[in-house]
Amino acid sequence: MIAWLIALPLVAVIAAGLRRLSVRRGRTALRWVLAANALLFAAALALLVVALDGRSAQAAAPVAAAAPTTGSGSAALIGAAISVAGASLGAAIAVAYTGAAAVAALSERPELFGRAMVIVGLAEGIAIYGLVIAIILIGKA
């Protein structure tokens, strides 16, 4: 848990730096953004390894030695978080593209409203699939 609390300000600083870089244009800005993305990926991978390690922060305490803990519960919770985050990002990207196409189609032919909303709704269903998987994983924890 402490690793997560230490990493949050680091992620905020990197996100602020990426925001500043987005103002710049050209090939150098793209290289900086790709480097920052690689750094964030490495940091997230390191945090995932630490979280799935199975050892708790109170493992040195004598009380915790009496009741050994396993990492399966935390692994299920992290898996649930990853499934919700991934499905939400996928749904956001899908809704962005289908929503833009639906608005463009509606501007030309307003009678396509029902069909356009069905397609956008199908794209939103991706997030619900991630939520269902998360609920199943939390139930296993």
Image (cartoon, helix red, strand yellow):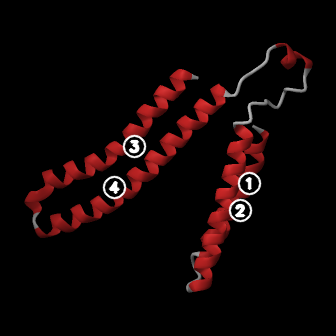
**Mark 1 near mark 4, Cβ–Cβ under 8 Å?**
no
**Mark 1 near mark 2, Cβ–Cβ under 8 Å?**
yes
Which of the two labelled residues, at mark 2 and mark 3, occupies the earlier sequence position? Answer: 2
Number of residues whose C-alpha sits closer than 10 Å to that of mark 4, classed few (under 14), some (14–19) or many (20 or more)? many
- Compared with 20, 48 (above or below) is above
Residue underneath mark 2: 13
Q: Position of residue 135 (x, y in %)?
A: 47, 28
Mark sitting on residue 9? 1
- Disc 1 versus disc 2: distance between alpha carbons? 6 Å
Q: Secondary structure at mark 2?
A: helix
- Disc 4 versus disc 3: distance between alpha carbons? 10 Å
Give the residue type that dot 1 points to. Pro
Write the residue at 59% across / 82% down.
24
Residue placed most toward the observer, 75 or 122: 75
Number of residues whose C-alpha sits closer than 10 Å to that of mark 1, classed few (under 14), some (14–19) or many (20 or more)? few
Number of residues whose C-alpha sits closer than 10 Å to that of mark 2, classed few (under 14), some (14–19) or many (20 or more)? few
Which of the two labelled residues, at mark 1 and mark 4, occupies the earlier sequence position? Answer: 1
Residue underneath mark 3: 127
Residue underneath mark 4: 95
Give the residue type that dot 4 points to. Val
- Disc 4 versus disc 2: distance between alpha carbons? 29 Å
Number of residues whose C-alpha sits closer than 10 Å to that of mark 3, classed few (under 14), some (14–19) or many (20 or more)? many
- Disc 1 versus disc 4: distance between alpha carbons? 30 Å
